[in-house]
Image: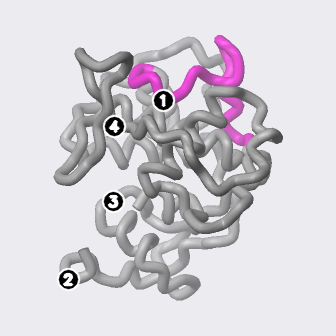
Amino acid sequence: PASVITSAGFTDTTSADVSCVKYYGITKGTTATTFSPIDFVSRWQMALFLTRMVVPTGTSLPTGADQGFTDIVGKSAEIQTAINQIKQLGITVGKTATTFAPDDFVTREEMALFIERLLKAVQAGPGGNEEFVTGNSGVKEIKSIDTDHNFTDLGTVYLIDGQNAIINLWNLGVTEVTSATVYEPRVNISRLNMAQMMA
């Protein structure tokens, strides 16, 4: 809420969404005074953002025990733990069974998949939307069963799961392009667009 969240104090953006993710400790910025809003987000950065986003939901993070990714050994302990935690939470499956590709950039399709999977791992907040996982009874999760959307470019999505994630997030009001007709699933996501979707 605007009355609670103060400006992040970054000199390169005044975005309220950036201030929101800074307020909740999801981002620390690229420096103490900059956010670098037009930079792309690497997969290791996204792992940090996602684990930091879990905490404000009231969900406990798993241990971060080794999940078998052989290409993260050169990263800091914090980054390795975050990558292992998002694997434990079911937010990522990795690029392969043994690789995470930590330095690759996150595409907008991958961003949708990450956030949709994160929503399956946490409880809905006040006013959140839940639907049955399957059928008309049983367990519910944060999602929308609506299938309408504005996007004309979802045929360029690599995975049907990616298309479903984009549509789900659009119906939940998560995508930052709510009235646009293109989502650009194969484009790398910027730090500003990431903040907008996380907020």
Q: Residues within 10 Å of mark 3 (few under 14, many from 20)?
A: some
Q: Is residue 103 magenta?
A: yes
Q: Which residue is mark 4?
A: 142
Q: Residues within 10 Å of mark 4 (few under 14, many from 20)?
A: many
**Are the residues tagged 2 and 3 within 8 Å (C-beta)?**
no
Q: Which residue is mark 3?
A: 25
Q: Calculate the distance from the C-alpha at mark 1 to the C-alpha at mark 2.
A: 32 Å
Q: Which residue is mark 2?
A: 3
Q: Residues within 10 Å of mark 2 (few under 14, many from 20)?
A: few
Q: Calculate the distance from the C-alpha at mark 2 to the C-alpha at mark 3.
A: 18 Å
**Are the residues tagged 1 and 2 within 8 Å (C-beta)?**
no
Identify the residue shown where x is 63% and y is 23%: 94
Nearest to N terminus: mark 1 or mark 4:
1
Secondary structure, mark 3, is: loop
Q: Residues within 10 Å of mark 1 (few under 14, many from 20)?
A: many
Q: Nearer the viewer, mark 3 or mark 1?
A: 1
Quadrant location of the C terminus?
A: bottom left
Q: Name the amino acid, label 1.
A: Ile
Type of secondary structure dominating the magenta stretch: loop
Q: Name the amino acid, label 2.
A: Ser
138 in relation to 78, above or below:
above
Nearest to N terminus: mark 2 or mark 3:
2
Q: Which residue is mark 1?
A: 91
Q: Can you give x and y, in whole percent of width and height, for residue 24 in the image?
A: 30, 61
Identify the residue shown where x is 39% and y is 24%: 89
